[in-house]
Amino acid sequence: MAKTSGKTSSNPRGRRPAAGGAKRNAPSPLTTLFGGLKDLMKVNFDNRRIPTLIGLALAACSLFACLALITFLFSGGSDQSLIYAARDGEAATELGREAKNILGLPGARLADYLFNQLFGWGIVFALSYVVYLFAHLIWRPRIAPYRYITSFLINGFLLLWVSVAAAGLQSLFPSDSFLRWGGLRGEELFTYIYKGIGIAGLIGVLAFTLLIFAVTCSSRVLSAIQNPKVPKVPHVSVPRPQVGGFFSRLFSRKKKDEEPQSEVEGESYSQDEDAWRDEPPMPTDDEDMDVQEEDPTPYVVHTPTTATTSHTAEAAPSVTSFSRTTTSEPSDVPEMIVEEAPKDDLVEDGDRTAPEPLAPGIQLALYRKPTIDLLRDYEQGGTGIDMEEIEYNKQKIIDTLASFKMNVTPCKATVGPTVTLYEVIPESGIKVSRIKTMEDDIAMSLKSEGVRIIAPMPGLGTIGIEVPNSTPQTVSMRSILASRKYREQQEKMELPIGIGKTITNEPFIFDLTKMPHLLIAGATGQGKSVGLNALITSLLYSKRPEELKFVMVDPKMLEFSIYEEIERHFLAKLPDAERAIITDMTKVVATLNSLCIEMDNRYRLLQTAGRAVRNIREYNEQVRSGALKRIDGHEILPYIVLIVDEFADLMMTVGKEVEQPIARLAQKARAAGIHMVIATQRPSTDVITGLIKANFPARIAFKVFSMVDSRTVLDSPGANQLIGRGDMLFYQGKDMIRVQCAFMDTPETEAIVEYIAQQESTGSAYELPEYIPEGEENGAKGFNPNEKDSLFDEVARMVVQTQVGSTSNIQRKFNIGYNRAGRLMDQLEGAGIVGVQEGSKPREVYIKDQATLEQLLQKLS
């Protein structure tokens, strides 16, 4: 019974703690209240409500204090009797008299306390610091916190110095004024110093402290002390002392006794290498006394002038000084060059409609290249340089690296359409490899993605940090093809391709014949297809149909379908192909092998042309000059560009059968005028094999999602740090160049294709040589047991069982290539299992049952 009652009584005891625990776990009202207040404070800090309220309160206090002080100084001491009466507790008629201060008796007492009881004229700097605080809390919230401390120290020093100096002056020139020039605190500090070291010591302390302050804040004073002007004495030269790396770059100046430059050299800012080193104008005394928050050191923006800008009638100066100033810093912030991207130098398009001079061998006399009017201008209007953003990013980079004990000195910022390149110089003793690992930390500090570090910059001795702009610009294809640089390179290059702009806003143009083949890789949606369209458009604008042909492989079936209308102008295909654009992967192997035959035929043609011809360019020049006669069978050979949109899908579908012809073309096709552009979105090693990579030195990488993919494409990281939307890296075996790909919209491509399609053509697509797989030549096939394929027996059983004699069926069932399937079909024909080929129909199967087949297989073995 006791046990039963014990068990019964134990259950409630077991439940009570659970209930009590549940109550204890429930949040208390006080916790809920503090949590709500915490969330409210966080929201108010995020939207800057609390800093703004604090700034407004400081603004009100400073306004009242200034009004009280101004009226106090001009009152002539008439309010002093009221102040003393209120201080002594007298309630006589003095208290009934109205004060002259604009804020009444409280204003007079406040002004008397601030001026006479504290620091006298030095109180001006205390008020200036309050103004600095509320102005930056309200209007400049992104300023670095340490600048508040810097401004506090500067104003604090001036407050004490002016207070002591004013108290000393008043002691030397006593007067009956109601004002204490240095205030009570200033007089006490003056008396303490005067009793200790006397008047001479006091003057020395004031002089040297002011000199130290001027050296700290003014570069002119530092330069004057480091390089004193000494009168020239015959046979005596005063050497200029060498200054350290930081101060040498910041304060170095050209000597004034150098010979003046000519007027022409003075106007050309771009030719003066030391123009950016000139010191800023000396601030006035008032500016030094007020110690304003803004330092009058201007940013110097250097715009590089290219060779193409010399063609313009009136070239604008290449150096621009921005009036925006930075916060005064004693020695931490050196001068930094901000290099602005130059304006586009565009060329008028009027000459495109005029008749073109026809060279020998040109067949389409009435053909006109597309005009620039077919392209749109997507680029935004010039917004200039956002110096606030550049200053903010620069300081964040310095602070982030300094927090890891890596001090750097900024020296240059190059602003591009989408990315700004900041160049910094590390202090001696800092390993470059350490800075390379700081990409993620800098990206987190800047709250930005796509930060890329180039350490070191090739040939410059600096470290580059690429930071995306907050407002990137869209690069239009129009600005590339209409640029003067593209027009000039168009005459010099065989296959000029303008694909985008560099970070200095210059059109990036390269010659495909110098590559000679191009590999493009990038994740889905990062601009790979747009880059291919830009490449094709650039070639359509530069070449005529007689000079260029495309072979397009489109596994997606929709990417290149828009170019079908120009089949008779710029496309090439097999003789029996229905469509020029290849979408059936089973026909790709035949096309690639046909290109190999075309390559061999061209080499034989070049061989018969003589020793003076080593490539297709020299051959075409000989034809145009008449050295090679058309009657002898010599005609202008067009360049052939093979473009594969998705190579990974091709490798998965056709297998390794395409690797051999592609490797052959990559090794030998350059001199024959056949070039390849292969694109893939899966840059893995089974797609981009070592054999392919070895023959594709030129590569373009759009954004990929892992460092492994970047190393597969570029043999180095970097593509995983891009920002997408056409941001890419161009690599050709040496330096990598960051380029923003030009944007091509579908309506633009349609307009270009329609413009070309309406013009005269050659009547048909360029025919490639017919390719016949091995073993498919006409005639009876023999069977050699020694050459029997290992899959022969299995394939024979499958053919007899299905009664379908088809090469594609064998290829699909056994997952083999087209060439091997063709050889197996030839062996089946030689063994008498299937009949001869009759067009596109499946072959007739002679053996109808498995028993007969097994007997035949035993005989053949």
Image (spheres, rainbow, N blue to C red):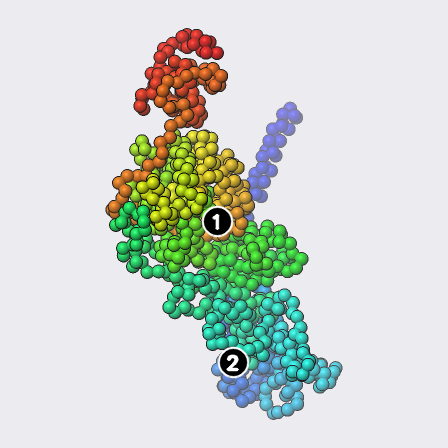
Q: On the rendered structure, is 572 left or right of 461?
A: left
Crowdedness near tag 1: few (<14), some (14–19) or many (≥20) residues, C-alpha within 10 Å: some
* Amino acid type of the residue that numbered disc 1 sits on in the rendered structure: Phe
Q: How far separated are the C-alphas under marks 2 and 1?
A: 67 Å
Disc on res. 816: none
Q: Please name the residue shown 40% across and 42% down the image.
A: 609
Residue 104 pos. (x, y %): 50, 82
Is label 2 in contact with label 1 (beta carbons under 8 Å)?
A: no
Question: Given the current orientation, which residue lies at the most extreme right position?
Answer: 196
Residue 380 pos. (x, y %): 37, 58
Residue 108 pos. (x, y %): 54, 82
Q: Which residue is mark 2?
A: 68
Residue 807 pos. (x, y %): 38, 23
Front residue of this view, candidates 91 and 32: 32
Disc on res. 730: 1
Residue 32 appears in the rendering: no
Regarding mark 1 in the picture, which secondary structure is present there? strand
Regarding mark 2 in the picture, which secondary structure is present there? helix
* Amino acid type of the residue that numbered disc 2 sits on in the rendered structure: Ala
